[in-house]
Amino acid sequence: MDTSRLGSGAAPGTGWRSRLATVAAVIAFALVVLAAAPADTPTSDLLFDQSVVNDFRLTMKPGDWDTLRATYLEDTYYPADVGWQGQVVPIVGVRSRGSGSRNPYKPGLKVDFGRYLDQKFVGLKSVVLANAVQDPAMLKQRVAMLMYARMGLPAPRVAHVRVYINEEYLGLYMLIEPIDKNFLARVYGTDGTGKTENGGYLYEYAWKDGYEWDYLGADLRIYAELFEPKTRETEAPSLLYGPLEDMFRTFNDVRDDDFEREVGASVDLRQFVQYLAIENFISEYDGFLGFWGPNNFYTYRFQGRQVSQLIPWDKDLAFWAIDRDIFQGVTANVLARRALAIPWLHRTYLETLLACAASAMAPASLDSPVGWLEAEVLKETAQIHAAGYGDMRKPFTNERFDDELGKVLQFARERGPYVVREAQKALGWIE
């Protein structure tokens, strides 16, 4: 054995043992690191995992948290760290959020991962923590968005989480995927040229009391108040709002014979009536066909095109009534009324209602005695019940919580058969 390579001037074997010890130490350290590493690489699919109720932990200065609650009507951001399944996202921005759901005791929250640092978490720029204070069942948003997605329309992902602030249980929340460029890329994929479809014009609609989309004139400031841009925000008003003004004028002024052609150039009419049908199937009280005028949706105008689609948002007031009219709100809104006056769109609307009912009533599995919608409500109820009972900041009692869960379950059982009968009557299939 040539010992000259084992160590300069060392006794035979000394260098060999030293190097072996070093290698062993490196291997041991690597094993410790691997053992400590999370089993799964974090992904957005894991973040929105609906099979469990995960913990979502916020750590922030107590004074900042107190100020956020005291000024809950403001949108001021405060720094915080986020903890989720052993992952820590440092120095994110947290602010109060919501419209009618703003609350100082159990604030709705927006978490902006990149507010202070150039960072994302699982590919997302931000998430929403909805406080469910307007939904005593505390699950309507999740069930409603699943219904849209199940019917093939783009909808945000929703999962339940237990939220902790400085290790104190804040309550049961719904973690919601924001409608932004990441969302657009996920739901639309690529366009005809292979380019990611998220470079168009995305707007969040701002509710205007009782406004049913009459034409309000050529002043672009009107449309700037109604549609808040969420992409391409710095472009000229003529590019952001000019097409919207043209669209509203066309809705109202175009001749009936030209409506489908001219309005169809700016609105995906098939998707529009499908959206309305799903909304009325889930008996949405505060949506596009809501009791107070259109509300709670985004619009997206595709890149390089003029046509746009609706995207649902905020379904706290869905599942309102089992016997809600399947044409609720249709005649009040200019666009809805004129679109459904076209025979094939009217039929598409009714067929979509029937498809919703069929999907809701379809067995959840091969051996399931209940339909998908009922099974989903039962599953979510079992998941969230303990966390909901333990939520001491919710503005309703546990008895009300149980009562509302029961109402949603009854809706899941009975809405489908009701809609089938009403749609068949409207189609002339039954008396």
Image (cartoon, rainbow, N blue to C red):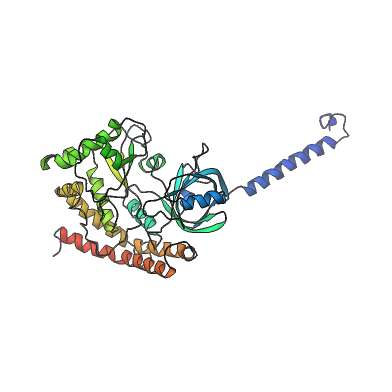
- Picture coordinates of residue 113 (x, y %)? 49, 42
- Picture coordinates of residue 158 (x, y %)? 42, 52
Q: In which quadrant will I find the N terminus?
A: top right
Residue drawn at x 52%, y 46% as measured from the top left: 42
- Picture coordinates of residue 314 (x, y %)? 36, 52
How many numbered tags mark residues here?
0
Quarter location, residue 418:
bottom left
Front position in the image: 85 or 29? 85
Residue 112 in the figure: left or right of residue 247: right
Q: Residue furthest bottom?
A: 399
306 is higher (above) or lower (below) than 110: above
- Picture coordinates of residue 99 (x, y %)? 37, 51
Residue drawn at x 57%, y 56% as measured from the top left: 167
3 is higher (above) or lower (below) than 269: above
Front position in the image: 66 or 99? 66
Quarter location, residue 254:
top left
72 is higher (above) or lower (below) than 192: below
Residue drawn at x 47%, y 61% as measured from the top left: 393
Is residue 59 visible in this depiction of the protein?
no
Residue drawn at x 29%, y 48% as measured from the top left: 207
Residue 339 in the figure: left or right of residue 405: left
Is residue 143 visible in this depiction of the protein?
yes
